[in-house]
Amino acid sequence: MAERRFLLVDSSVLPDVFLKVLQAKELLASGSVTSISTAARQAGISRSAFYKYKDFVFDAETGREAITVIATLLDKTGALQSLLTGISAAGASVVTITQSRPENGTAQVELTVRTGTMQMTVEEMLVKLARQPYVVEVHRGT
């Protein structure tokens, strides 16, 4: 199989079908619709067009709005909830959470956080998270 090559192209020069596939994918991801047939119909494309392009069309803006946050938490009841509350208070939303087993009284948590709707900068959020109860350390991942 040939190596995949990705290009960043201004959407204004693409055929409408690509934007409509993105629209259908967004409808499905948001839960606005529950079936591919409905999503394709609302976006104004056929199901076959959706299936043909769905794995090849992505929104470059979406990836920029997510960061990784790595935190070391004390092994105490409510530690993770405190961290999640701080993220929510910043206007961000959690996409994924991975937590290690507690060792020596602490556990490491790695979160993917969507930042597009935040009311503060990422740096401000990290400072506030570091002040949360049971948080030993917090920083932005790479």
Image (tube, rainbow, N blue to C red):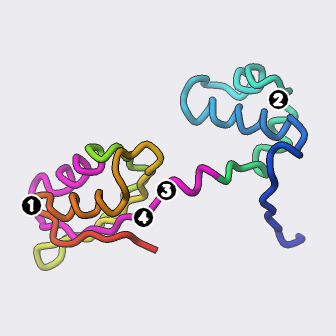
Graded by Cα atoms within 10 Å as few (under 14), some (14 to 19) or many (20 or more), the crowding at tag 3 reads: some
Which dot, 1 or 4, sits closer to the camera? 4
- Using the numbered discs, state the Cα–Cα distance from disc 3 to disc 2 in whole angstroms: 30 Å
- Using the numbered discs, state the Cα–Cα distance from disc 4 to disc 3 in whole angstroms: 7 Å
Q: Under tag 1, what secondary structure?
A: loop
What percent of the width, then of the height, locates residue 141? 41, 72
Graded by Cα atoms within 10 Å as few (under 14), some (14 to 19) or many (20 or more), the crowding at tag 4 reads: some
Graded by Cα atoms within 10 Å as few (under 14), some (14 to 19) or many (20 or more), the crowding at tag 2 reads: some
| Residue at x-position 12% and y-position 52% | 78
Q: Badges 3 and 2: C-beta atoms under 8 Å apart?
A: no
Magenta segment, which residues? 61-87
Front-most of 127 and 86?
127
Q: Tell me the residue that label 3 is attached to.
A: 66
Q: Tell me the residue that label 4 is attached to.
A: 68
Q: Tell me the residue that label 2 is attached to.
A: 47
| Residue at x-position 17% and y-position 77% | 103
Q: Badges 4 and 3: C-beta atoms under 8 Å apart?
A: yes
What percent of the width, then of the height, locates residue 140? 37, 69
Q: Tell me the residue that label 1 is attached to.
A: 76
